[in-house]
Image (spheres, grey):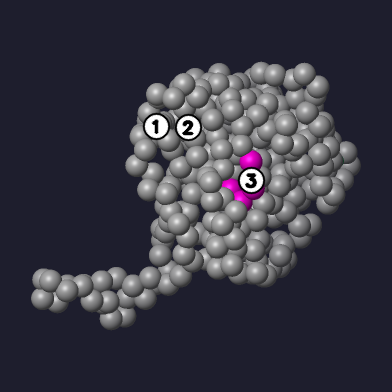
Amino acid sequence: MTTTRSTGTDPLVQLFGYVPVYCGFTIDAYIVAPVPDHAKVVQCVTDDSDEDSRFYYPPPAHRETSRDGKQWRRKPRSRHVPLLFPMPPTHQIAPADGSTHLNSDTFRNGEGGILIHSLAFLHGARAQFSEWWFDGRIPVESREVCGIPDAQLATVMAFFLHTYRQLIPADRPRLINLLSLRNRIQSYYWAWERFAFSYMVFDALYEMCFRYKMIKQAKHHKDRFASFAQAGLICDCSRCRAHTYTFATLRNQLFHESLWHDAPITGDGPGMADVFLPRLLNVLIAQMMRVPCDYVRHCWSSLSSSALGLKPGAHP
Ligand SMILES: [Zn+2]
């Protein structure tokens, strides 16, 4: 993969990727826009990706060694899959007032983090700042959570940022991690991995929603889904409820007995649990970010996609 990479040396601007959707918005102090060569970047990455899985995989790497203190040579028997690797930026964040420095760890660990991971979440992508590298495989096309009209993106992002600001400071990194981990689920290879890490995010959402009094405490771990349903935050039809029973059973067997239902650990698992639990997470995240939309009421166990349906005039 060869692309023209921005240097990222402008202290006012923060580059990030990898969001293959050409989109931008302005909220409060920030202007988020695609990089000028967005189409070229996306084309280069796509051309170098796996067409069947629609993921970009990093090429094998080698360590280097200096034999005479001057010339670096490839170290024998050092071929490996790199743990971390860079991706070209697809977007940038610039200060609306033209003066605030955004190229800092303070920004990246704060409002910058919530901006990039929220945008990636809404487009079913993964995000990282250009100075910070990726791990795992990277989706090269949008796996949209729901259809969001371009004109509504700024408003939805404003709800995410507003909710982030309403949290007590200690909880803000937790929300950033939660979104980052949700976006990372698709990069796992096996169904049981996607399910296990989805459940980890689900438990984190339960904890946050309980502490902010959005739901009542569940008596048992398996009742956590019912807590969300009783609060009216997720669909409670018989089909969705049946899936939650499956999730709880699978979780106990996997976490406590190393069992993946009756299937081999390399199998798909029952009831497409690795597909529907992430879909449930999407609804819970939209609810937690308090986005007033029809999407949160849709039947998350349906295979059909759903439009966001933002309420007219909605604003945080
Ligand atoms: Zn339902």
**Crowding at label 3, few (<14), some or many (≥20) Cα neighbours within 10 Å?**
some
As for residue 219 lying within the magenta part, the answer is: no
Give the amino acid type for the residue marked by disc 1 in the picture: Leu
Instruction: Give whichever of discs 2 and 3 has the lower sequence position.
Output: 3
Q: Which residue is labeled 1 in the image? A: 12
Q: Which residue is mark 3?
A: 22
Total tally of numbered discs in the picture: 3
Contact between marks 1 and 2 (CB within 8 A): the answer is yes
Q: Is 182 or 261 nearer to us in this picture?
A: 182
Q: Which residues are magenta?
A: 19-23
Rendered residue at 74%/38% (across/down): 148
Alpha carbons under labels 2 and 3: distance apart? 16 Å
The residue pinned by badge 2 equals: 94
Using the rendered view, name the quadrant where residue 82 is placed: bottom left
Crowd around label 1: few <14 · some 14–19 · many ≥20 (10 Å): some
Is residue 257 visible in this depiction of the protein?
no
